Amino acid sequence: MAIRSCLMLQITIYLTPDKMGCNCNKHNPIIRQLDLQQELIEQNISEPAFWSGRIRRELSKKTLAPIENDAVKQTYNWLVSTIRKGGSLPVTVQLLKELNGRITGDGDFRVKGVKVGKFSNLMHSSRVPHLVEHQINHYSNLEDPTLFDLQKLHVDLLLIHPFSDGNGRTVRMFASALALNLGYKSSLFVAFEQHFDHDPPAYNRLFNELRSSKIDKQCVALKLLRAVYENTKYIAWFRLKYRSLQQQGLNEIEISQKLHSIVDKNLSFEQQKQLNYQLRRTLSEEDESHEFSHNQQLC
């Protein structure tokens, strides 16, 4: 009962505006809330889910050839398949390079300067190998890494900009690999490529503000962490409401009627659209997980 009461308290916070700013000491409450959201969302998902939906550039209207879009989705599914087959995803420089190779066809660190928008004063190419290895080793040596630690590595690698092309796609895919290692299964958590679906340009704005010294790295990592939370909060809230109504002994028809009323009362039209999207994704992943488990039993 104490856990359920805590969940109730936390979920009521989910629907309030973000007043956290960039205080990096605030990441622990989000981590705890994400733990609760994971329990609610992944309760019926036994295996990591494959890719679903579009990639960030498709949503932001930036042009990528279909083969480039497919490369992102296929690389994500390769990570999931590796975990499903009982394999592991080593947190190494080699994995980062392999992901870039799968996404862009290259896979080697850049050997000259690179420009990102109006910013050209990026890390000198001669420093890239050492700095990438240093940052990845630092993460690997953490005793109990969290999503916040993962997001800090995400920021550091993207600032280094180690490749000639596909840095954002590669680093976000590397973050997905790390999230799979942490035990996350739903693509709502793991598909970092989609965490800014509600506002795709916001991701670039964050890093432009960082490169302009308007905000610091801790602030960006916190906002990236917040994006995971935003991408999963409505379905978690809905699942908790459903669980509460079940505990009251209501039948499915009564639960459905009450849920419709609760959703209409508490969520705006746009929030209901996000809830429906997150709900469809979760139900599809549950069906996929059940089918995979059934096939494994047959084998």
Image: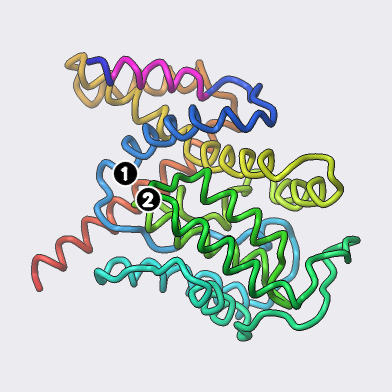
Give the structural element (helix, strand or loop) at label 2: loop
* Residue type indicated by callout 2: Tyr
Query: Residue 89, located in which quarter of the rendered image?
Result: bottom left
With 62 as the anchor, is 224 left or right in this view? Answer: left
| Left or right position of 274 against 284 | right
- Alpha carbon separation for disc pair 2 and 1: 8 Å
Residue 286 position, x and y percent, is 29, 50
The boundaries of the magenta stretch are 4-14
Is residue 270 a member of the stretch shown in magenta? no
Q: Position of residue 13 (x, y in %)?
A: 50, 19
Judging by the rendered image, the residue that carries numbered circle 1 is 42
Few, some or many C-alpha atoms within 10 Å of disc 2 (few <14, some 14-19, many ≥20)? many
User: Could you tell which of marks 2 and 1 lies nearer the N-terminus?
Assistant: 1
Verify CB contact (< 8 Å) between mark 2 and mark 1: yes
Residue beneath disc 2: 184
Q: In which quarter of the image is the N terminus?
A: top left
Nearest to the observer: residue 209 or residue 186 = 209
Residue 287 image position (x, y, % from top left): 27, 54
Element on which disc 1 rests: loop
